[in-house]
Amino acid sequence: MRLDEIDLRILGLLQEHGRMTNVELAERVGLTAPPCLRRVRALEEAGVIQGYHAALNPDPLGYGLTVFAMVKLRSQAEHELQAFEHHVADIPEVRECHMLNGEIDFILKIVAPDLHSFQRILTTHLTAAPNVESVKTSLTIRASKALPGVPVPA
């Protein structure tokens, strides 16, 4: 799918203001509502827009701790990599999982209510997982930037 200037403006606005109505979006990009909605639906069907969500503050929900875990596997055979990905997909506290190039195979973003809860996740779900050689963790002190999505060209 080729993205034109209007598509890019639609994407930028929706990424920044996901609850914007179609009428407001159409006005901001210079279209009437029906063609704007057709473009949004085409972007969704093409997989450019993957979904919509609310950005939640973890603290009031009881998740005061964010940890990044660097996981090294014993084997990097494709079936082993996929098995690990499937394993962490079932752990709700693992919010992100990225396969890396280099000495570390995966980096995970994990949220937990407290250090004790994180330790339980670490020992029962990560270090005990099949094929895991080591897990190194870093607790976050603060987040100074956490933007969702990607930069959209103007």
Image: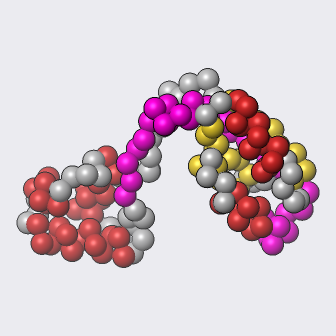
Is residue 29 something that shows in the picture? no
x, y percent for residue 57: 44, 36
| Image quarter in which the N terminus is found | bottom left
Residue located 70% across and 65% down the image? 86
x, y percent for residue 138: 72, 32
Residue located 71% across and 37% down the image? 118
Q: Is residue 76 magenta?
A: yes
In the image, 117 versus 132, the foreground residue is 117
Residue located 30% across and 75% down the image? 42
Is residue 120 something that shows in the picture? yes
Q: Quadrant of residue 87 in the image?
A: bottom right
Residue located 68% across and 47% down the image? 108
x, y percent for residue 67: 67, 36
Taking the image as shown, residue 25 lies to the left or right of residue 55, namely left
In the image, is residue 55 above or below residue 50? above
Q: Which residues are magenta?
A: 52-81
In the image, 101 versus 135, the foreground residue is 135
Colouring: secondary structure
x, y percent for residue 147: 44, 41
Q: Is residue 51 magenta?
A: no
